[in-house]
Amino acid sequence: MKTMKKMMTWIAVVGLVLGMAPGAMAAGTIYEYTSGSRPIIVFSLSTESEFANQGLYPTGGTFTEWTSGDSWTIPESFNSIVYLVVGGGGGGGGKTGGGGGAGGFLTGTLPSVTPGQSLTITVGAGGSGGAHGSAGQQGGSSFLTYLTTTIEAYGGGRGSSENGAQAPGGGETVGSGGGGTWAFISGGESESGQGNDGGDGLADSVNKYYLGGGGGGAGGAGSSASGSNAGDGGAGKEWEVTQLWYAAGGGGAAHSKGTGTPGQGGMGDTLKLGGDGGHTANTSTAGLPNTGSGGGAAGDGNGSAGGSGIVILTVPPPPAGTLFIVK
């Protein structure tokens, strides 16, 4: 993790591994470590080795048990809360599908909280990849609730499939839209303020290019298929507190019997977060867990799952130094 400004701060990070049903209550672990002068608490279903292998956070901390959806007591150091809430990424479509859309990306401040009271935090799971010829599953929403205030980051849109009846958004409210495909051309629309649209698919029967669009990301729309290339997933977005990136889209697929090129997963700075689209059977990849990134679509066979979402809490930075005026 990059060096950050020195200030005493708690961070709570909440993440789920793939495969949980949206909104499901799941047993997990609390991972606690210190980065510089900043104690950090991470809530995740990942094991210690899985968590470290993501390359997003340092090792050397301690683990205890926790359950997603349970309450979390506000410590004495919190009088207001700065938050990041990211929904689970959408699953990529099966067989010549579109990439899954990223989960919604929301940041803001709860301006006044009372230490000793409770927050309820639920993290959205990544949507499953679509079976052969079926759309992917929408990602689960992530929630942060304090008293009567609830912040919801919607799950990412499902990637479409060559079955044109299965739209890439499905009519649901989503963070970023899933990618379209050759049979259902238009990419899915995003929820305003939480992400971007998915890219369009393409059908070229003369050259036998049947291509899916990329899923939208928090930092940009998924690209549309063009020429012989399926669409890439939209870029993720950086949160300045952690200086890490989240919520990129999954890549679209190229039909297994054609000669097109599948799309790439969306990027976060130099790290690929979204899953890659596939060309031959079951060659797509999943979105990165705990980033809310979309899964890649399948050229043949099944699409890949979206990455689980995340919730991060911290306190505002200390005020700037006092200005002394000498007369």
Image (cartoon, grey):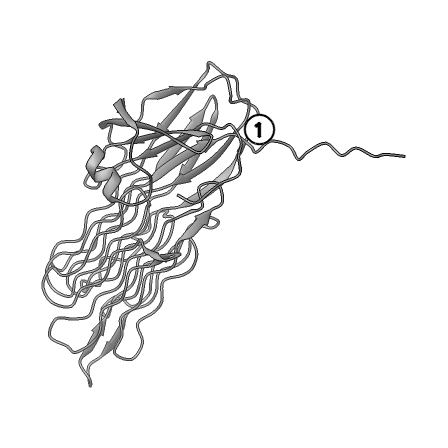
User: Toward the viewer: 319 or 292?
Assistant: 319
Residue 66 makes an appearance in the image? yes
Residue 20 makes an appearance in the image? no
The residue under label 1 is 111
User: Toward the viewer: 56 or 210?
Assistant: 56
Q: Give the vertical position of 166 relative to 12 (above or below).
A: below
Q: Is residue 201 left or right of residue 80?
A: left
User: Percent x, y for residue 27?
Assistant: 22, 26
Q: Quadrant of residue 298?
A: bottom left
Q: Give the vertical position of 299 relative to 250 (above or below).
A: below
Q: Is residue 66 left or right of residue 173?
A: left
- Mark 1 Cα shell of 10 Å, populated few (<14), some (14-19), many (≥20): few
Name the residue type under label 1: Pro
Quadrant occupied by the N terminus: top left
Q: Is residue 69 left or right of residue 92?
A: right
Q: Quadrant of residue 69?
A: top left
The residue that appears at 18% across and 40% down in the rendered structure is 19
User: Toward the viewer: 32 or 83?
Assistant: 32
User: Percent x, y for residue 36?
Assistant: 44, 34
User: Percent x, y for residue 281?
Assistant: 9, 63
